[in-house]
Image (spheres, rainbow, N blue to C red):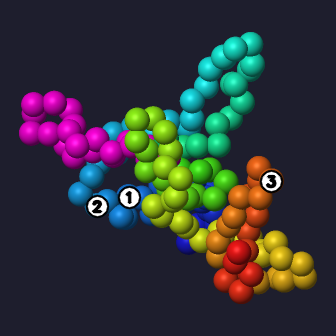
Amino acid sequence: MSDFDPSPARRGLDALLRANPALDVVSVDWGPRSFEDGIDVDAPSPWLLVELGQRSMGVAEVWARHPYAIWKATGSVYGMRGGAVDDDPLIEVEPKGVLCHFERCESPATSHAFVDGGVVFYCEAHRP
């Protein structure tokens, strides 16, 4: 047995693949990198971009492409439309090894919320 502890992004990707067993991975991008408006946006992206698709019968590489974005900090999987990420996640993975943020609670976290631009983890009893 391995001591490998997959990142939340990896667990999100695994959950996405389990939810779509009939689709193949077309592409995976650790996130966009560029330099825009004089601002260095070459910093790591918070998104793992994934495209799944159904293999074609030789006419094209794939058809029925489905783009997804995985929030690296939580592993939550979001759909995408026209390059924009949907507001609500399609799949949420349980945080592994993370404790509840609530004061004096030491229960394992099972969900998260976005607070003041960051991610805060909660157990079921303290979920907002």
Residue 3 rendering spot, x and y as whole percentages: 64, 66
Please provide the residue range marked out in magenta: 50-69
Q: Earlier in the sequence, mark 3 or mark 2?
A: 2
Mark 2 → mark 1, Cα distance in angstroms: 6 Å
Q: Quadrant of residue 115?
A: bottom right
Task: Please indicate whether residue 90 sits to the left or right of residue 109 in the image.
Answer: left
Please indicate, yes or no, whether residue 69 appears anywhere in the rendered image. yes
Q: Residue at x 48, y 64 (%)?
A: 91
Write down the residue under mark 1.
17
Write down the residue under mark 2.
21
Q: Secondary structure at mark 2?
A: loop
Task: Please indicate whether residue 100 sits to the left or right of residue 45 in the image.
Answer: right
Mark 3 → mark 2, Cα distance in angstroms: 36 Å
Q: Secondary structure at mark 1?
A: helix
Q: Which mark is residue 116?
A: 3
CB within 8 Å, label 2 to label 1? yes
Residue density around tag 1, few if under 14, some if 14–19, many if 20 or more, within 10 Å = some
Mark 3 → mark 1, Cα distance in angstroms: 31 Å
Q: Residue at x 82, y 72 (%)?
A: 101
CB within 8 Å, label 3 to label 1? no
Q: Secondary structure at mark 3?
A: loop
Task: Please indicate whether residue 56 sits to the left or right of residue 102 in the image.
Answer: left
- Residue type of the residue flagged with mark 1: Leu
